[in-house]
Image (cartoon, rainbow, N blue to C red):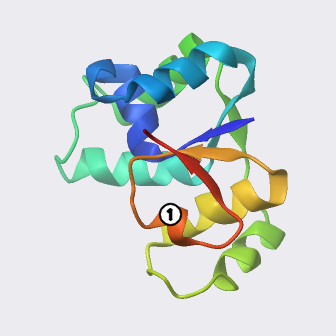
């Protein structure tokens, strides 16, 4: 199972040339095993509202259209995941990434991310190159 970091989801949907060959290959090999955390909706909406990304219309339409288009499943946040994210080492403080990391650890998922900090967490599988 593959968990897309928010930027990976955005690039898959709108700037595929920014994805690594390895990520494209992994997505192609497991199209039914693609997931995003619910936190991606929050991060995507905030990035869109701040003008940091172009969702080519409303952020929610961009999100739901591309979830359907690529067959990506939502992995919802619950109290257990929220608390688990607070128990991770203080490698960085990004709450979005902490939820994504906790989700991947709980469900034994590989995170597809260009982020260089996420792979520093113990027992986290993260791939880009």
Q: Is residue 14 above or below residue 81?
A: above
Q: In the orientation shown, which residue stands out farthest toward the left?
A: 51
Residue, disc 1: 118
Q: Is residue 10 left or right of residue 74?
A: left
How many callouts does the rendering have? Answer: 1
State the image quarter where residue 69 is shown.
top right
Of 23 and 71, the residue lying toward us: 23
Evaluate whether residue 61 shows in this view.
no
At 75% from the left edge and 35% from the top edge, which residue is drawn? Answer: 1
Percent of width and height locating residue 64: 53, 25
Q: Quadrant where the C terminus lies?
A: top left
Of 116 and 56, the residue lying toward us: 116
Q: Is residue 98 above or below residue 39?
A: below
Q: Is residue 129 above or below residue 20?
A: below
Percent of width and height locating residue 84: 75, 76
Q: Which class describes the residues within 10 Å of circle 1: few (<14), some (14-19), or many (20+)?
A: many
Evaluate whether residue 42 shows in this view.
yes
At 66% from the left edge and 61% from the top edge, which residue is drawn? Answer: 124
At 74% from the left edge and 79% from the top edge, which residue is drawn? Answer: 83
Percent of width and height locating residue 126: 57, 51
Q: Is residue 88 left or right of residue 22?
A: right
State the image quarter where residue 79 is shown.
bottom right
Q: Is residue 64 left or right of residue 124?
A: left
Disc 1 element? helix
Of 37 and 23, the residue lying toward us: 23
At 53% from the left edge and 88% from the top edge, which residue is drawn? Answer: 90
Percent of width and height locating residue 60: 44, 33
Q: In the orientation shown, which residue stands out farthest toward the front?
A: 129
């Amino acid at each position: 199972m593959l968990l897309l970091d928010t930027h990976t989801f955005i690039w898959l949907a709108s700037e595929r040339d920014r994805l690594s060959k390895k990520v494209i290959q992994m997505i192609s090999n497991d199209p039914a095993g693609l997931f995003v955390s619910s936190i991606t909706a929050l991060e995507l909406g905030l990035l869109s509202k701040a003008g940091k990304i172009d969702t080519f219309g409303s952020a929610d339409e961009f999100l739901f259209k591309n979830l359907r288009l690529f067959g990506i499943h939502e992995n919802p946040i619950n109290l257990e995941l929220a608390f688990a994210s607070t128990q991770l080492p203080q490698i960085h403080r990004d709450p979005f990434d902490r939820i994504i990391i906790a989700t991947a650890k709980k469900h034994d998922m590989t995170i597809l991310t260009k982020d260089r900090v996420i792979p520093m967490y113990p027992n986290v599988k993260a791939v880009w190159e």
